[in-house]
């Protein structure tokens, strides 16, 4: 039960963070491109790399804390379903090039950000 509560609380924190981030991105950049979703997925991947590597190298935490951070907060912060919807909407608008840029930029950016987070923690904590 503690694990479920940890994930639920983390999910609430992450989803709130995603909403606030996306709202600011919309306000700053406008509605033409899904900058909010792109940003949360890349930032969330970077933070995933940082957290997972920091926990592996230095910090011992309970399974509940790990679940709160990784499954809850980051699971609530990042979003694959919004990414999929954004691509389908771009394709419906016949913005094929923008949809391709968004798809490859999201996937490539997220993986690179994750690797950068891991690398950064190895440099900082080693």
Image (tube, grey):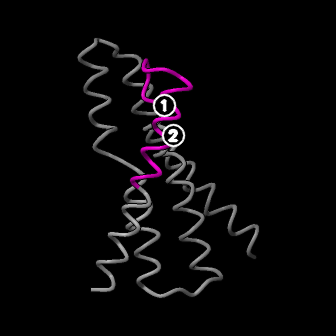
Reply yes or no: does residue 16 show up in magenta. Answer: yes
Quarter of the C terminus within the rendering: bottom right
Our reading of the magenta stretch's main secondary structure is: helix
Quadrant in which the N terminus appears = bottom left
Q: Residue at x 51, y 62 (%)?
A: 48
Return the residue nearer the eye: 126 or 44: 44
| Residue 92 location (% of width, % of height) | 23, 17
Q: Which mark is residue 39?
A: 2
Most foreground residue, 42 or 35: 35
Report if residue 79 lies within the magenta region: no
The local crowd at label 1, few if under 14, some if 14 to 19, many if 20 or more residues have their Cα within 10 Å, is some
Report if the CB atoms under discs 2 and 1 are less than 8 Å apart: yes
Q: CA distance from mark 2 to mark 1?
A: 6 Å
Q: Is residue 61 above or below residue 75?
A: below
Left or right? Give the position of 34 relative to 46: left
Residue at image point 55% right, 62% down: 49
Taking 72 as reference, is 97 above or below it? Answer: above
Q: Nearer the viewer, residue 114 or 64?
A: 64
Q: Which residue appears farthest toward the top when viewing the image? A: 94
- For label 1, the SS is helix
How far across and down, in percent of the image, does residue 103 sit? 39, 32
Count residues near mark 2 (Cα–Cα under 10 Å), then give few for <14, some for 14-19, many for 20+: some
- Residue 122 is marked as none
The range drawn in magenta is 15-34
Q: Position of residue 24 (x, y in %)?
A: 52, 34
Q: Which mark is residue 35?
A: 1
Q: Residue at x 46, y 46 (%)?
A: 41
């Amino acid at each position: 039960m503690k694990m479920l509560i940890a994930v639920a609380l983390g999910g609430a924190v992450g989803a709130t963070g995603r909403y606030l981030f996306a709202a600011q991105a919309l306000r700053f950049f406008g509605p033409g491109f899904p900058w909010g979703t792109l940003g949360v997925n890349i930032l969330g991947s970077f933070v995933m790399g940082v957290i997972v590597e920091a926990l592996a190298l230095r910090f011992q935490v309970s399974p509940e804390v790990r679940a709160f951070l990784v499954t809850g907060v980051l699971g609530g912060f990042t979003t694959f379903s919004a990414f999929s919807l954004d691509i389908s909407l771009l394709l419906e608008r016949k913005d094929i090039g923008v949809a391709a840029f968004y798809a490859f930029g999201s996937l490539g950016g997220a993986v690179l950000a994750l690797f950068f987070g891991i690398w950064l923690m190895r440099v900082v904590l080693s």
